[in-house]
Image (cartoon, rainbow, N blue to C red):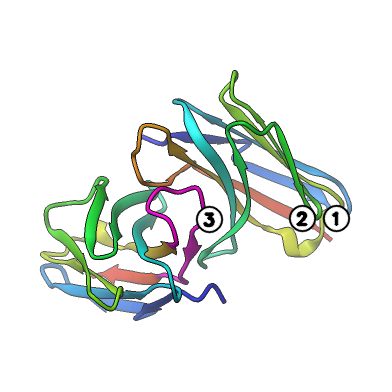
Amino acid sequence: SQQGEEDPQALSIQEGENATMNCSYKTSINNLQWYRQNSGRGLVHLILIRSNEREKHSGRLRVTLDTSKKSSSLLITASRAADTASYFCATDLNFGNEKLTFGTGTRLTIIP
Amino acid sequence: DSGVTQTPKHLITATGQRVTLRCSPRSGDLSVYWYQQSLDQGLQFLIHYYNGEERAKGNILERFSAQQFPDLHSELNLSSLELGDSALYFCASSVAPSLGAEAFFGQGTRLTVV
């Protein structure tokens, strides 16, 4: 089963609008990462947020983490056509299980 | 370019056959992870190696095996292939055995079993 579940499964917005994706997970984590995947290609790391952090920024990306609710959100501001991709959250569990567990992904489409 | 190299990019083979997928991690990365991505199962963790030793195992079938060699490249062997094994297989590398660092993914090997 998936540790992370992204919501929504698919999102279409106009270029220039902001896009928000959410991720929920089930167990305690050390950190949470967001990745982007262009169709059929490898995943690209976007941002990592540690369990003791609440918010992090990187360029047009803003990630929040609420460990009490076991959830995270990824905000992409001023979206561009090139942001069209699938976005995944990934968690590593904090009992020493050395693997990244990925969610089901959000398919984001930016309409020019 | 992530610095992780996977070969081959595409592979078409018949049921019952055996294939080997190869991964060269980024220079300096000791950890290699293998993932399977299919439409119905999403990204599934298969196995993790660190500096030649197996560190974690996921839902890897008994027909699948992997190893990491002294030069740190890794191979994933898939045998007695079934139609359901058709998927994208990714490897990723990282500096750390426990993931406080990002993972760098290769472009994947698309396996089609016919």
Residue at the outermost bottom position: B8
For the residue carrying disc 2, how many other residues have a C-alpha within 10 Å: few (<14), some (14-19), or many (20+)?
A: many
Disc nearest the viewer among 3 and 2? 3
Within the magenta stretch, is there residue B105?
yes
Q: Residues within 10 Å of mark 3 (few under 14, many from 20)?
A: many
Which residue is at a point 36% across and 61% down the rendered structure image?
A: B31
At label 1, the amino acid type is Glu
Name the foreground residue: B17 vs A95.
A95
- Residue at 36 percent across and 49 percent down: it is B44
Marks 2/1: CA distance?
6 Å
B28 lies left or right of A31? left
Residue type at mark 3 is Glu
Q: Which mark is residue B46?
A: none
Q: How many marks?
A: 3
| Three-letter code, disc 2 | Ile
Q: Nearer the viewer, residue B19 or B96?
A: B96
The residue that mark 1 highlights is: A15
Dominant secondary structure of the residues highlighted in magenta in the image = loop
- Find the distance from the CA under tag 3 to the CA under tag 1: 29 Å
The residue carrying mark 3 is: B102
Give the distance between the C-alpha atoms of the residues marked 3 and 2, in whole angstroms. Answer: 26 Å
Q: Chain of mark 1?
A: A
SS of the residue at dot 3?
A: loop
Label 2: which residue? A110
Which contiguous range is marked in magenta?
B94-108
Q: Is residue A78 above or below residue A44?
A: above
Q: Answer whether labels 2 and 1 touch (C-beta < 8 Å).
A: yes
